[in-house]
């Protein structure tokens, strides 16, 4: 195990062979001097995990679980490259740290499953999007939300430059020979014309097609996120003409990302995404209302829990600002409320989300002000 961080979780659920499951969340800071307090707060949260573990587990097991946390606390390089939040999930034989693009509430939980709601808030939130920065010669990919936007690493299969995409098929600049000076023929002068315009345009089109296919397959389709194109106006037309990416939004940004500040790029991207975001939330709220009116929806956590365990929930909306300490019986789906400090108790809404995702349902974490209920949940049933 190491203390390197994963910027974007590949999945929220892991085949944990042993319990306990330790979940730690902390708001962090991107720059000095604000980030100086982050390791101190982290150590305090680790101490809370230790205290909770001591209620149930022997010292030997506690030491093995806590050691990776201590290693991370001592990693200066890690704390000098944090973003807005930190999530750490650990269990016997497993230790994963995630840098997050938005702050999360401080939380240290020991339970029989991971506490994933703060990660769901980021990964399942309707405000996430990607930005494709495009020129004739290279691309960049960004991922963010209304509050933050950061460049992400491209999948190995995605060409970063036109040379990577076309290789030997890239049109070579053409040379012409002219004669100048005195003498019968004069000295030969070689001039590169940079290729004929139609060939250059053809190369750009082939590059854009390769980028479109690779981004769709390795980023858009796996994430399901809307894609905003950031490019010069003349490149918008060509890329959209060849693109088959259904996640590409009609609204784009008519500058290359290198020519604007990171904050301006985020603001312009959010202006393009916000109408899509609001439309999606409105559609989900309307669908819940219609389903509940027909008896195919509910907002009572106890009823939703029974339906989730039975595999009946197709869509679950959960309130980002709500927390209900408790547990779900995995056989009956019955709910028992309890104390979140207990080492086998998690957030009920977190467990509901896990059940729904495991049975193929959709989970969306919704801002409190846009939730259609006051109970923390809104579920649409399959039957």
Image (cartoon, grey):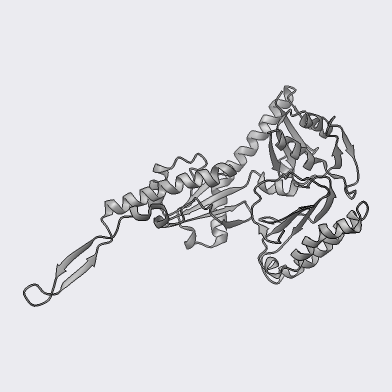
Front residue of this view, candidates 193 and 91: 91
Q: Position of residue 281 (x, y in %)?
A: 65, 38
Q: Quadrant of the C terminus?
A: top right
- The part of the image, by quadrant, that contains residue 283 is top right
Residue occupying the point 50% across, 39% down: 246
Residue drawn where x is 42% and y is 44% of the image: 240
Q: Residue furthest right?
A: 55
Residue 228 x/y as whole percent: 51, 48
Left/right placement of residue 215 relative to residue 351 reads left
Q: Position of residue 99 (x, y in %)?
A: 68, 57
| Residue 139 place in picture, x, y as percent | 46, 55
In the image, 67 versus 73, the foreground residue is 67
Work out which residue is located at the far bottom of the displayed protein and give it: 182
Asked if residue 160 lies left or right of residue 312, the reply is left
Q: Residue at x 74, y 32 (%)?
A: 379
Q: Quadrant of the N terminus?
A: bottom right
226 is higher (above) or lower (below) than 72? above
**Number of numbered discs on residues:** 0
Quadrant of residue 33 within the rendered picture:
bottom right
Residue 175's place in the image compared with 342, above or below, is below
């Amino acid at each position: 195990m190491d203390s390197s961080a994963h910027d974007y979780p590949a999945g929220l659920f892991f085949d944990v062979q042993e319990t306990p499951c330790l979940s730690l969340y902390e708001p962090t800071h991107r720059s000095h001097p604000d980030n100086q307090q982050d390791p101190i707060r982290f150590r305090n949260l680790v101490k809370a995990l230790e205290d909770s573990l001591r209620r149930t587990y022997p010292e030997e097991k506690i030491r093995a679980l806590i050691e990776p946390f201590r290693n991370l606390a001592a990693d200066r390089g890690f704390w000098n490259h944090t973003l807005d939040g930190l999530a750490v999930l650990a269990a016997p034989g497993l230790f994963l740290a995630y840098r997050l693009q938005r702050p999360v509430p401080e939380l240290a939980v020991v339970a029989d499953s991971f506490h994933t709601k703060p990660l769901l808030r980021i990964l399942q939130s309707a405000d996430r999007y990607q930005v494709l920065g495009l020129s004739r010669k290279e691309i960049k990919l960004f991922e963010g939300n209304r509050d933050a936007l950061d460049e992400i690493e491209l999948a190995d299969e995605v060409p970063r430059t036109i040379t990577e995409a076309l290789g030997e098929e890239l049109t070579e600049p053409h040379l012409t020979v002219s004669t100048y000076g005195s003498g019968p023929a004069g000295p030969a002068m070689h001039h590169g014309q940079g290729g004929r315009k139609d060939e250059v345009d053809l190369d750009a089109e082939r590059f854009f097609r390769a980028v479109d296919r690779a981004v769709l397959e390795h980023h858009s389709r796996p994430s399901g996120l809307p894609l905003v194109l950031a490019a010069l106006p003349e490149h918008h037309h060509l890329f959209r003409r060849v693109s088959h990416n259904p996640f590409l939004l009609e609204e784009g940004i008519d500058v290359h990302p290198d020519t604007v500040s990171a904050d301006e790029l985020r603001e312009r991207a959010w202006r393009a995404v916000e109408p899509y975001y609001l439309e999606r939330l409105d559609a989900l709220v309307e669908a819940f209302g219609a389903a509940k009116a027909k008896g195919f929806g509910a907002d009572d956590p106890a009823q939703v829990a029974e339906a989730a365990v039975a595999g009946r929930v197709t869509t679950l909306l959960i309130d980002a600002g709500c927390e209900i300490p408790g547990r779900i019986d995995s056989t009956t789906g019955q709910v028992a409320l309890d104390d979140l400090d207990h080492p086998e108790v998690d957030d009920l809404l977190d467990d509901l989300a896990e059940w729904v995702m495991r049975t193929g349902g959709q989970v969306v974490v919704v801002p409190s002000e846009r939730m259609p209920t006051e109970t923390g949940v809104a579920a649409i049933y399959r039957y």
